[in-house]
Amino acid sequence: MSKPTIDDYLDNGIYGQKQTKPDERRKFLGSLRERIVIALTQSQVREKGVYKEVQECLKKHPEAKLLLNGNMSYSFLSKYIKLADTYHVSFSMVTNKEIETDIGLVLAYDHAIDKEEIYVKKKNEKNSEAKTKQKPKKSLFSSIKNKLF
């Protein structure tokens, strides 16, 4: 590897230090996908109450860091800040006015953990799945048959 040139120093001064996977870092509030334990979208953070999945992950991973989208209102984030404080998990508000991301909350480590599924399903999606599993739909012919006989 060659020594850095003056152009390299100037580029670092003008554009900042080079990063790996900058698009991924912008999306996940400065972290990488492979480091994330759990993530919520902004709409999920705005919902009433706290997701129990996040609460469980905060209990299990106290050495991870909670990253919150600083572009969101504090009133939505405060419930998760209190929860992080309860479980002694450090948190940080990440504000980047230049980049829009749909992520509202991320619990991440400073090293890779490669968790398969990081997103939590919305509360209303869970309820609709439970209802469809409980009551299977009948076909048109079976409903007509039941009415005739």
Image (tube, rainbow, N blue to C red):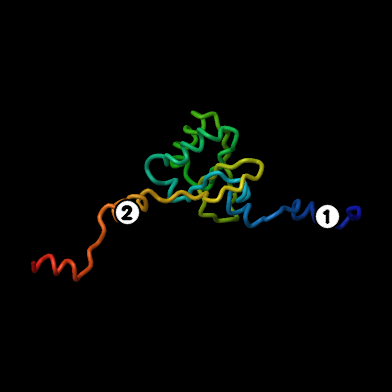
Q: How many numbered discs? A: 2
What residue sits 77% from the left and 54% below the top? 14
- Looking at the image, which is closer to me, 3 or 56? 56
For mark 2, give the secondary structure.
Answer: helix
On the picture, is 133 further left or further right than 5?
Answer: left
Compared with 21, 82 (above or below) is above
Task: Answer whether labels 1 and 2 touch (C-beta < 8 Å).
Answer: no
Compared with 74, 138 (above or below) is below
Binning the other alpha carbons within 10 Å of mark 1 as few (below 14), some (14 to 19) or many (20 upward) gives few
Of all residues shown, which one is farthest toward the front?
A: 149
Q: Where is residue 145 in the image (x, y as percent from the top left)?
A: 14, 69
What residue sits 39% from the left and 46% below the top? 47
On the picture, is 147 further left or further right than 75?
Answer: left
For mark 1, give the secondary structure.
Answer: helix
Give the quarter of the figure containing the N terminus: bottom right
Q: Where is residue 65 in the image (x, y as percent from the top left)?
A: 59, 38
- Which of the two discs, 1 and 2, labels the residue nearer the N terminus? 1
Q: Residue 10 carries which label?
A: 1
What residue sits 80% from the left and 56% below the top? 11
Which residue, given by chain and number where applicable, does mark 2 sit on? 128
